[in-house]
Image (cartoon, grey):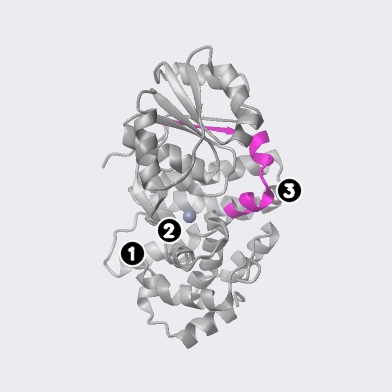
Amino acid sequence: MIVNFPCKILVEKSVKGKVDTMLANMRLGDSCAIVCDSDVRKIIGDSVRDEISSSFNVDFVKPQSLEKKYLEALAKKVGDYDFLIGMGGGRVIDTTKYAAFLAGINWVSFPTILSHDGLMSSRAVIDEEGAKISLTAKEPEAVIADLNTIKRAPYRYIAAGAGDLLSNISAVEDWRIADEAGKEKYNSVIARLSLLGAEAVIEHSRHIRNKDVHGMEILFWSLLSSAFSMNIYGSSRPASGSEHNFSHALEKLGTKALHGEQVALGALISMFLQKKDWLKVKAVMEQLGLPTSAKEAGIERDTAIEALLLAPKIRERYTILDKYDITRKQAENMLQKVGII
Ligand SMILES: [Zn+2]
């Protein structure tokens, strides 16, 4: 088994003055492009460009879409750079990750929003003809987190990042269940790495809610440990089970809530079925200000029911849902019991 990790991690209240030395020491080449939108460029992109121009030729690339066709064209455009820096939220990071992978060049993850654990992972979630697909790409060579910038993101995204981590609890239990059913070998060391992030969120929910620097730092390391668990295992299994199935089903039905909000809702149902302490997770979600009902997440009652019925069929991954054959009536009852509808 070959395991790839980012080589360097830079996390500071302010990374100003530290990015150039780190990247120069990594010998990534002479030229790079910072992939970011105009807002992020104003907030931090220009200052990073000024700093690193002493070591690299730097250009900016403004990402336009997550469509596979666009990313294939973008990969051709950026292929002559030695590396890319993806600076922004999940969409920009996925754009950079996949374009760099196709171009065969390195990339650096510079998240300005900590909304999910894909920010440092090797898998890219992109669009293909309207549908979301998850593809193997490449892990970043380095991850840079400027906590003061991350703090500026709207709180809803930060809470969603915490929600994505809470969902690791049901994902790990699904993994254990899959092992019991003889479907997939459970690895308790990797599972603990995934759970670490969820536990840290529970322990530090107050700091996260306050959006203080300590809370952002905890959230960053938690997302990183979750991403590591997936990178080590080689698939999203350690951090994605039936609760992610529910979220993927919701997306297919056209919902617009954030990934982290949807998977946290899904975790309540999954943990209910797994006979685990879903009430504890719900209490943490309330503390974090995450939606705990479909209505709060802007999801229609019927859509939530449909999604739960669709969830077992959404992909090939053995979960608690495979132990049940849920009828519409049962789905309705279950969603009512956990307070989602
Ligand atoms: Zn997730």
Please state the extent of the stretch shown in magenta in the rendering.
Answer: 141-160
Q: Residue at x 40, y 17 (%)?
A: 27
Kindly indicate the quadrant of the structure image that contains residue 284: bottom right
Instruction: Of the two numbered discs 1 and 2 on the same chain, state the one appearing first in sequence.
Output: 2
Disc 2 residue: CB within 8 Å of ligand 1: yes
Q: Is residue 147 magenta?
A: yes
Image point (44%, 61%), residue name: 171
Q: The residue tagged with tag 2: helix, strand or loop?
A: loop
Image quadrant of residue 139? top left
Q: Is mark 1 within 8 Å of ligand 1?
A: no
Nearer to me, 64 or 153: 64
- Disc 3 marks which residue? 210
Q: Residue 228 versus residue 246: which sits nearer the camera?
A: 246
* Dot 2 alpha-carbon crowd within 10 angstroms: few under 14, some 14 to 19, many 20 or more: many
Q: Which residue is mark 1?
A: 317
Picture layout, residue 243 above or below residue 121: below
- The reply to whether discs 1 and 2 touch (Cβ–Cβ < 8 Å) is yes
User: Can you tell which quarter of the image residue 10 is in?
Assistant: top right
In the image, residue 51 lies at what x, y percent? 58, 17
Disc 3 is placed on an element classified as helix
Name the outermost residue toward the bottom.
Answer: 329
Say which residue label 2 marks.
Answer: 240
Query: How far is mark 2 from mark 3, CA to CA?
Result: 27 Å
**Of the residues shown, which amino acid type is indicated by label 1?**
Arg
The kind of residue tagged 2 is: Ser
Q: Position of residue 96 (x, y in %)?
A: 44, 37
Q: Is residue 120 visible?
A: no
